[in-house]
Amino acid sequence: MKKLLFLFTLCFVVNANSQYLIDSLYINKGDLLINQRILVIDSVSREELINRIKNWGGVSFVNLKEVLVSETQDQLVFNYITSGFYAKSLGIQTNMDWYVRMVIQVKDGKVRIQQFDDGNAYRPGSYSGGVTIPATQARLYHLNDYFVDGVSRKMYNDGFAKFKNATKSTLSSLENNLIKPKSEKTDDGWR
């Protein structure tokens, strides 16, 4: 009996420690802010930084016109879908597309990039294994809806980690494009 109680306690402690906390996902839970980065890029004008951001967006997304939802003189707003979030239950993984809103503010020599949880993407109804799953309207849920008292259920842990890594990867890709040093001219005149 003591061995059984010990094993139960051990399993509970291991499970409790492996839960994903809401503070690991959001920098600011109230604003649903996932990531924020401020870059100082000396001697680069606002116009050049905006040009670099748009060039990055043109390469990173299939259709920049669909993803770039707002543009002002000193701010660009991208709204894109990532497939990083998923739930895993009984060995079955269910992928959930998710909107990320990325607000990029630009000044001469400075860029502030913020990524926000913008809600779930539309999910059409499906029929699988005798179970009908109803359609889900877009932006009905946010990731914080999958937490109870700041702790996620185990079935979402890996999905949250993958989602956070996907947003960080996008952020790093943009950052690398913005701070890249100018390369020397090549033989064909491109730099």
Image (spheres, rainbow, N blue to C red):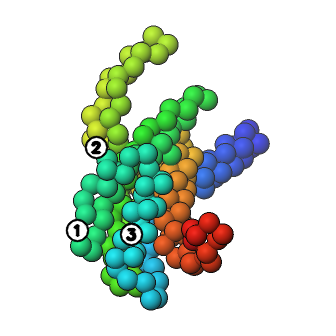
Residue at 49% across / 13% down in the picture? 129
Q: Picture coordinates of residue 50 (x, y %)? A: 36, 71
Q: Give the class, few, some or many, for how many residues have Cα within 10 Å of label 2's Cα (few <14, many ≥20).
A: some
Residue at 32% across / 35% down in the picture? 122
Q: Picture coordinates of residue 178 (x, y %)? A: 48, 72
Element assignment for label 3:
helix
Kindly report the distance in space between the C-alpha atoms of the residues bearing marks 2 and 3: 30 Å
Kindly report the distance in space between the C-alpha atoms of the residues bearing marks 1 and 3: 13 Å
Q: In which quadrant will I find the C terminus?
A: bottom right
Q: Is residue 57 above or below residue 74?
A: above
Q: Which amino acid, mark 3?
A: Asn
Q: Picture coordinates of residue 140 (x, y %)? A: 27, 41
- Which residue was labeled with disc 3? 51
- Which residue was labeled with disc 1? 72
Q: Which amino acid, mark 2?
A: Arg
Between 5 and 119, the one nearer to me in the picture: 119
**Residue 35 image-quadrant placement:** bottom left
Tell which circle, 1 or 2, labels the residue nearer the N-terminal end: 1
Tell which circle, 2 or 3, labels the residue nearer the N-terminal end: 3
Residue farthest to the right? Answer: 3
Q: Which amino acid, mark 1?
A: Thr
- Which residue was labeled with disc 2? 139
Q: Give the class, few, some or many, for how many residues have Cα within 10 Å of label 3's Cα (few <14, many ≥20).
A: few
